[in-house]
Image: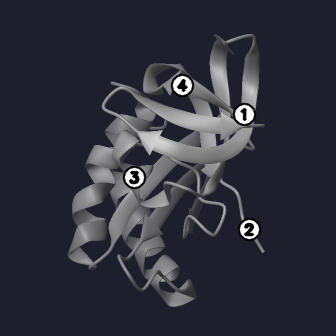
Amino acid sequence: MTLEQKIAGLVTPAIEALGMTLWGCEYIAAGKDSTLRIYIDRPDVGVNVDDCALASRQISAIMDVEDPISSAYYLEVSSPGLDRPFFKPEQYAAYVNKTVNVRTRTPEMGRRKFKGKLVEVQAEQILVEVDREVYEIPFSNIDKANLVVEL
């Protein structure tokens, strides 16, 4: 179990009790400037600053008691935003036919960075169209992925 998975397990019940969902979390280790980012959302309506502040207080209290991170860190609680990062395979389905950025751990068909249309979400992979070529990218090889804001 990763640190992020452990933290998600600790904070999810409190976030859900507030009527919100945990979109995802990430820990960026940087010594005394380490950051724990928790992304929250509310289906169909999103979250505002007051929601983030309320959730932050709840999450902070849980983190103080459970202490899964022994060193100092900054806690950031926010909405995933328009350029939302993807953390779980099921999060992709709502964004089929939208533009995504994907970075893989190892090369897929000779490349690691893909910016293109999310064509399909399958059980084990996504299909992304870049310059009229479709790439099959397994979830297990995705390092980072996010939605691209289209204006």
- Mark 2 and mark 3 in contact? Answer it, CB < 8 Å: no
Residue behind mark 4: 137
User: Percent from the top left, x then y, of residue 90?
Assistant: 34, 47
User: Circle 2 sits on which residue?
Assistant: 150
Residue 106 percent across, percent down from the top left? 65, 11
What kind of element bears circle 2? loop
Which of the two discs, 3 and 4, labels the residue nearer the N terminus? 3
| Residue drawn 56% across the image and 69% down it | 78
Name the spot of residue 6 as percent of width and height, x first: 33, 37
Q: Amino acid at mark 4?
A: Ile
Location of residue 136 with respect to 12 vertically, above or below: above
Residue type at the position of mark 2: Glu
**Would you say the residues marked 1 and 4 are in contact, meaning their CB atoms lie under 8 Å apart?**
yes
Label drawn at residue 65: none
Cα–Cα span, label 2 and label 3: 18 Å
Side (left or right) of 2 relative to 107 = left
How busy is the neighbourhood of tag 4: few (under 14 within 10 Å), some, or many (20 plus)? Answer: many
For this rendering, which residue is in front, 30 or 39? Answer: 39
Do residues under tags 2 and 1 come within 8 Å of each other at their CB atoms?
no
From the image, which quarter does the C terminus lie in?
bottom right
Instruction: Give the residue at x 32% y 56%.
Output: 11
The numbered mark at residue 93 is 3
- Report how far apart the C-alphas of labels 4 and 2 lie in the structure: 22 Å
Using the numbered discs, state the Cα–Cα distance from disc 1 to disc 4 in whole angstroms.
10 Å
